[in-house]
Image (cartoon, grey):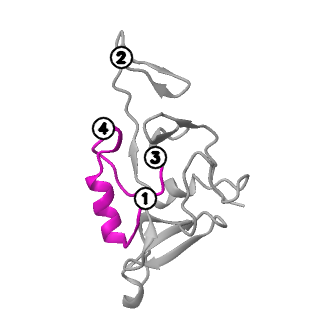
Amino acid sequence: MPAFPVSPAIVDQGDSTLLDDATQLLWQQSAGPSLNWNSAVTYCGDSTLAGQSAWRVPILTELQNLIDDAYDPEINPLFEITRGGFTYWSFTDFTSSSDILSERAYAVSFIDGFTLDSPKGTSHRVRCVTDYTCNATWQGQPVTWQGVCHEW
């Protein structure tokens, strides 16, 4: 069982993104392509999904927060999972004093909720994330209802 908090409120934004209401992170709903780590960083950095431009590869703890062992695979079913693509890159480097292990980063497997370190040249899926910003306002306050931003 994970030793980190599970986010209970994942809200479908209706634009191929999901809002984690607890962390205010906006996630790519679909399973991204299988890429090596450097290509995953570029893929997210170039994304303009849902009109957002600050997409990035999530750090390890952000990705671990999506693990939910109530499901099989261990992620909320609102997130699309591609069969055979259950392991996702994090941006977090694996740190080691060994030069052999210096080009590794952490990844998370949603098959079992485990974290692994993987060579950056290996291909894993990527699920991009960005900080959530609701641009709709009324009297200077964001206009949201049940976690969804409403713009008129």
Disc 1 residue crowd, few under 14, some 14–19, many 20+, Cα 10 Å: many
State the quadrant of the N terminus: bottom right
Q: Which amino acid does label 3 sit on?
A: Trp
Residue at horizontal 57 percent and vertical 52 percent from the top: 65
Report which residue position mark 3 lands on: 27
Between disc 3 and disc 2, the foreground one is 3
Between disc 2 and disc 4, the foreground one is 4
Report the Cα–Cα distance between label 2 and label 4. 17 Å
Report which residue position mark 1 lands on: 32
Whether residue 46 can be seen here: yes
The range drawn in magenta is 30-57
Report which residue position mark 4 lands on: 51
Residue at horizontal 26 percent and vertical 54 percent from the top: 46
Q: Which of marks 4 and 3 is nearer the N terminus?
A: 3
Q: Which amino acid does label 2 sit on?
A: Thr
Whether residue 21 can be seen here: no
